[in-house]
Image (cartoon, rainbow, N blue to C red):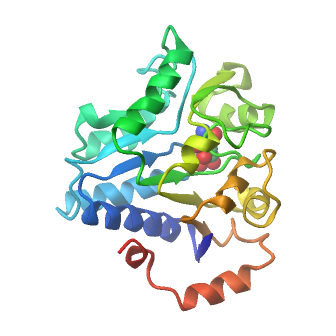
Amino acid sequence: MRVIIRKNAESACVTAARTIAALVHRKPNAVLGLATGGTPVNCYAELIRLHRQGKLDFSNVTTFNLDEYVGLPREHSQSFYSFMHDKFFNHVNVAPSRVHLPDGMASDLAKACDDYEQQITDAGGIDLQLLGIGSDGHIAFNEPGSSLASRTRVKTLCLETIRDNARFFGSEAAVPRLSVTMGVGSIMDARRCLLLVTGANKAAAVRSAIEGPITSQVTASALQMHRFATVVLDEGAASWLTRKADYQFAESSMPDPDELLG
Ligand code: GLP
């Protein structure tokens, strides 16, 4: 794992965005795996900024989102479909036909999950998967106990995640209990993974993911087994790392993340 620590959340988000932009420059028809949550909003804002400056063209890019709530219509303000359109898709030139999110309203959810996996395969696989982390160490909605070999499926949310996400729904009772999520195995198939985490409230989860044992109790820890996983943190998220000085020392002699994709 490559661990990059930035001074603040804004600069961590810019680093993540520049890494994505570098990939799209190199491979204009890249397949991007995208994530929701408060954390990547400024990463999307930077990508939009680059696009508006004429420096980034998404017209041949394909996207797959990690997850969606079950039972929320697309037009619901808290659906991940709405989130992605508000924060990103409506502001760049990704072709609507190349945008994919799991369908949490499908009448046959098991089939929709299998179809989603097939669509990713048909697109040639994901070149770069952007990820966040839940306070319980989850990636996408792969809650503690998720098989590290799991594929896209329906997953029950944990109580901690329901509590965390109540801020978007007004109350815990209003948070859906189920999601459709890419599995840990689906995520591990991406050619590159980019985990972006900001804020001291995630410091414990980050330490478990990077320095703890690989365990289904912290599904982000599976990234330790990925050949090309980069973690971009701000100082707060990095504050519990025991080897922080080593990561910073290693980073001082590494090329820019943009060059890594070269
Ligand atoms: C949800 C999403 C995850 C995301 C997490 C953290 O649980 N399913 O993909 O990483 O939220 O979100 P935030 O960035 O708001 O802390």
Compare residues 179 and 29 and report the one nearer the observer.
29
Residue 58 is left or right of residue 237, and the answer is left
Q: Residue at x 77, y 79 (%)?
A: 243
Q: Find residue 142 and report its image quarter.
A: top right
Residue 247 appearing in the image: yes
- Ligand number 1: quarter of image: top right
Q: Is residue 203 left or right of residue 64?
A: right
Quarter of the image for residue 242 reads bottom right
**Quarter of image, res 119:** top left
Q: Residue at x 41, y 45 (%)?
A: 125
- Picture coordinates of residue 56, whole percent (x, y): 23, 60
Q: Position of residue 228 (x, y in %)?
A: 54, 65
Check the picture and name the quadrant holding the N terminus. Answer: bottom right
Give the vertical position of 66 relative to 189 (above or below): above
Q: Residue at x 50, y 66 (%)?
A: 10
Q: Position of residue 75 (x, y in %)?
A: 41, 20
Q: Residue at the spot x=52%, y=10% of the render?
A: 108
Total number of numbered discs in the rendering: 0
Query: Is the residue 39 above or below the residue 210 in the image?
Result: above
